[in-house]
Amino acid sequence: MEHIVSIEEMIHSRKVERKEAGETSRGHDQPVIVSSSEEENFMKLKEARVKGMNRWTKKPKIQKDLLLRGHKDFQKYCQPRVISIGPIHHGNPRYRLAEEYKLTLAANFIDESGKTDKELYMVIKNNIEQLRRCFDKEVIHNYNDDALSWMLFVDGCTTLKFIDSVVDGNVRRFQITMVQVASVQQDLFLLENQLPYQILDDLIKNSNKGEKLKKSVQSFINVHSMTLKTLEKPANKEPAHLLDLLRNRLLGCTSVSHKNNSYQEDWRRSFGNVQKLKAVGIHLMANEASCLLNITFTKKWKFYGGILRLPPITVDDLTGIKFFNLIAYEMDPEFKNDYAVTSYVFFLDSLIKEAKDVMHLRQAGILRNFLGSDDEVAQVFNEIATDLVPNPEIYKDVRVELQRYYHDNKFKIWISQTVFYQAYSGVLLGLTLSLVQMIYTILSYEYQRRH
């Protein structure tokens, strides 16, 4: 409930800001005339009651991300680079060049489907009423059925052809540079650049290459999952869109059970970054399963410490973008979910404060750094984890045990620091005595030589 309250407070805060901004623009000295009938008021109340009962859904509507739009790195992580998919960024002059490539890819997809242009188009057009319900009214109100059907048709064909070509390794035959290929792959996982998965599914089912396309989509998601192959398959449910399919892949495992624990755990209280955990005797190991929920802590013998196991993860140029958009997706107030990805990023960020923490995670086989320096990795997680509120139930047992172990064994840090200081002092004293002895020997030799 804490997470939900935080989101509601955030929404309320943004509404207040917009209201105050509006009042400022009008001026405080001008009267505001508000009129409405009782019938209108009661109708609004009735609509709110119905909306409140059906607010949470498993498939929230595709809409603009209003909650994180004020984040200082929103443009960096959420603005499409080269291509617009869906209605939100459609028509932006910035993506005009990509429209020509989209038509080429779409035409090639149709040619290989075994269907005519009209036949495949009507698959989308005949279902446009249902597809409209997948979008927030604000982002499609300017589109009539024909315009919306055509846009979704072209974008759906383009997306599937691009994915299939990337998996086959022949996307460059469409005269797309490698830089553009990387940028388009990023753009396909942006929250504001999503298509209802139903469109992709319908096009796949109506293509002669349906089975191959289905495998290509799965391979594409596996490549972009940032983790190794999971031991368990994701739940067999139809995703809302590609970003949702990626989320299902990352969380494709059985949830970790939560034990009753009398220890009063506070998820806001830190149990220390990687360096501090290692200082109290906690060892890092990579988990066999790559599901993000598979984080465990096992205490060993009294003088051995414990083992913190985390799923191995790959960090590259797209990792921050995908995680940021997954977090934004989970923050949708209409999406009933457990904030699992948000909680994972929060947990990992609590372990990573600087480059040395990343280094230890690399050495343990938990993190593969394809981004660049360890400092860049630390910066990415510190950026995307700003102001996150995790699900307090996820990793609860792990956090409880880590907090207890860390705070009960802080003396080990003092001991290790004392031993290091003594050892350092001993070495320094030894070097100083050796230097004094050497100087004395040289001076004695010079004295004897002269006398």
Image: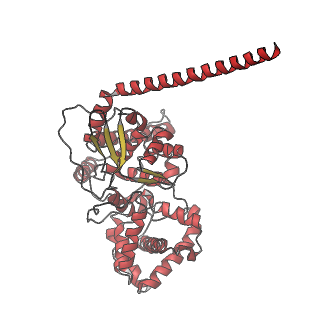
Q: Of residues 292 and 202, which is closer to you in this image?
A: 292
Q: In which quarter of the image is the N terminus?
A: top left
Give above or below for 9 relative to 317.
Answer: above
Q: In x, y percent, where is residue 263?
A: 22, 32
Q: In x, y percent, where is residue 391?
A: 29, 43
Q: Of residues 240 and 394, which is closer to you in this image?
A: 394
Q: In x, y percent, where is residue 203?
A: 38, 77
Give above or below for 293 relative to 307.
Answer: below
* Residue 347 appears left or right of 104: left
* Residue 215 appears left or right of 429: left
Q: In x, y percent, where is residue 140?
A: 42, 63
* Residue 139 appears left or right of 393: right
Task: In the displayed orientation, state which residue is furthest to the right.
Answer: 450
Q: Give the image quarter of residue 437.
A: top right
Task: In the displayed orientation, state which residue is furthest to the top.
Answer: 451
- Asked if residue 332 can be seen in this view, the reply is no
The residue that appears at 23% across and 51% down in the rendered structure is 46
